[in-house]
Amino acid sequence: MRKTLVMGLGGAGMNIASRVKQELGCDILAVNTNAATLASSPFDQRLQIGASSCEGKPAQSVHRGQLAAEESLEDLRYSIRGADRLILLTGLGGGTASGASPVIVDLALEMGIEVIMVATLPFDFEKPQRAAAQEALALLEKKNIRLILHDHAKALQPGKALLDYYNKASADIAVDVQKLLAE
Ligand SMILES: Nc1nc2c(ncn2[C@@H]2O[C@H](COP(=O)(O)OP(=O)(O)OP(=O)(O)O)[C@@H](O)[C@H]2O)c(=O)[nH]1
Ligand SMILES: [Mg+2]
């Protein structure tokens, strides 16, 4: 049997991952620069990255997210070892998500792990996040991975609360993960 590791990366990635955990009951590795978010999360496996570059706080830029993953490369390697397949859940646009995910993908590929990334894209009104997501996507699209994208901008309807979109994306991604786990 193939061994699949599900990872929730960054704040959105961890929120999505908790829904996936709730619905599918699978083990999840939570990865974030933000120590407080990790500490209050429901995951058994947690990895703080970039303790020096981010000092336990949100990365806030693609550059710092990248530095965080590079700084913690050996911890990441240790945490994903033994998996044949990585399902990486994240909300592109965040510093951690956009900066760390290309580094984590490269590490996994180098270790011979198949990578499937399931990511949300920011709303149009999140201008800097949208730019960060595009920057990350330009890198990720060149890599030998499967990318499944859920674009918040395309889902936008008047009068709906942000949380409704987040919940819908999380529910849709739980379905994606269920299908992937059944493959
Ligand atoms: N689906 C979903 N999307 C979210 C959620 N929270 C934020 N987002 C989206 O995800 C993007 C990234 O936000 P975060 O996850 O907070 O960013 P991060 O990866 O933690 O990066 P830093 O906070 O800079 O360390 C945002 O721009 C939103 O578009 C959530 O709970 N669910
Ligand atoms: Mg965050």
Image: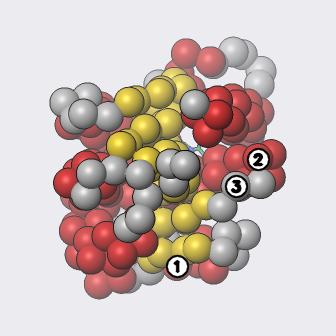
Give the Cα separation between the discs numbered 1 and 2. 25 Å
Give the Cα separation between the discs numbered 3 and 2. 5 Å
Give the Cα separation between the discs numbered 1 and 3. 23 Å
Asked whether residue 69 is in view, the answer is yes
Residue matched to label 2: 24
Asked whether residue 162 is in view, the answer is no
For the point 52% across and 79% down, the residue is 35
- Is there CB contact under 8 Å for labels 3 and 2? yes
x and y percentages locating residue 92 in the rendered image:
42, 41
Between 166 and 118, the one lying in front of the other is 118
Mark before the other along the chain sequence, 1 or 2: 2
Return the mark for residue 35: 1
Residue 150 position (above or below residue 14): above
Residue matched to label 3: 26
Mark before the other along the chain sequence, 1 or 3: 3
State the image quarter where residue 134 is shown.
top left
